[in-house]
Amino acid sequence: MAALAAALLAMAAQAKEPAKPAAPTDAPIAYLYDVTNGATLYAKQADLPSAPASMATLMTIELVFKAIAEDRLKRDQTFRISEDAWRRGGAPSRSSTMFAKLNSDVQVSDLLRGVIVQSGNDAAITLAVGLAGSEQAFAGQMNQRARELGMTRSTFRNATGQPDPEQKMTARDIARLSAHLIEAYPDQYKIFAEPEFTWSKITQRNRNPLLADYQGADGLKTGFTEDSGYGLAGSVLRDGRRLIVVLNGLETAKDRAEQARKLLDWGFTAFEQRRLFEEKDVVAEARVFGGASLHVPLMAERPVDLLTPKGDDARVVARVSYEGPVSAPVAKGARIGVLRVWRGETLTIETPLVAAADVAVGDLPRRALDGALELVSGAVGKVADRL
């Protein structure tokens, strides 16, 4: 762990006179994520499950995007607006709606815009039933996909985000899902930036307040119910740097817009960047079982930068974790562990570590010795080093 210790000591030596940064938002739930650097910039109750309102449709959209990307669904394919979708999500529902006509056939591309731009519940229900046969079955797929994406604290019960006591998402999970949508589906993601959409001769503006006047804003979703308050998942790309902001629990739409801009302004201007490791720098070593070498060097797949608020005096703590010892043979580039870095109580960096070299299977005496040590020490388990 010498490389890791040296990086942290060098950063500490460069620290400026301590000064506490001002709190960047009054929102009860807030999360600011730097996609470009893979860093959490701010977290306030970010892991508290709460009602997501229409931000839940980000998962609905992900499943549709995924089906299109895998050629299981065509953009020009049509789904029929059922009486259930029309009554619960259409004009009679008095909720956010696309105003799709009962028993009409609507293309998937239009339904997507109905969900993304107009926040239409009729469109979300129709897509869910079209893909899974029922909204209940689709909710099961939403939960399964959430676990695949590492969204461990979010639970879905419908495709719309309409109130359900068991439907919850965390701000961190919403940001994780948002970043995935941007990175996995760059062409389809462009729909989020469309300023308006017209259906049934009714033009509705995109509900995202950032699109109107915040430089670089190109997504994602707003949400509101009496249970959730006003929420927003917003994304901004500026000067090659992308930030995602997630807020929830605000009292008014004006508060939501103002607090999102305030937090984003802070994220773009209040940080300084310090490089911990260059690409392919050795960060740590992992113990190898039955290998020609006792250890395999670990490196990050890209440069590792730590973003800290200017004048922040929070303690920086790093940990390398892996399940070990690692069994030989080990291929260069294989994912072995994870580097996590905390600034104070905030987990700011979580990036995979890969093998920096091949490790072949050792000769018989080496394997026998490792086996004996394994029996004596019971060494297999989680290895973690903390500085």
Image: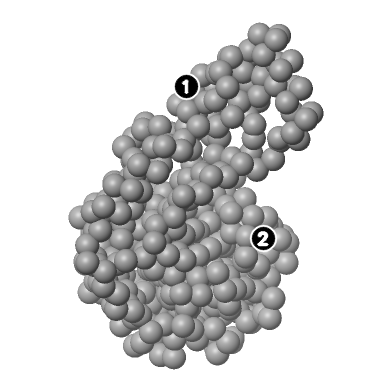
| Res 265 → quadrant | bottom left
Q: Is residue 101 left or right of residue 255?
A: right
Q: How is the image coloured?
A: one colour
Three-letter code for the amino acid on which mark 2 is drawn = Asn
Q: Nearer the viewer, residue 230 or 291?
A: 291
Q: Mark 2 packing: few (<14 Cα in 10 Å), some, or many (20+)? A: some
Q: Mark 1 packing: few (<14 Cα in 10 Å), some, or many (20+)? A: some
The span from disc 1 to disc 2 (Cα, nearest Å) is 37 Å
Q: Nearer the viewer, residue 196 or 180?
A: 180
Q: Is residue 54 above or below residue 185?
A: below
Mark 1 vs mark 2: which is more N-terminal?
A: 2
Most extreme residue toward the right is 375
Residue found 67% across the figure and 55% down from its top: 144
Please state the horizontal and vertical placement of residue 67, each as a whole percent of the image: 57, 49
Q: Is residue 138 above or below residue 352?
A: below
Q: Is residue 206 left or right of residue 72?
A: left
Q: Which residue is mark 1?
A: 357
Q: What numbered label is drawn on residue 143?
A: 2
Please state the horizontal and vertical placement of residue 161, each as a whole percent of the image: 58, 75
Query: Is any atom of residue 79 visible in this view?
Result: no
Q: Nearer the viewer, residue 120 or 225?
A: 225
Mark 1 or 2: in front is 1
Say what secondary structure mark 1 lies in.
Answer: loop
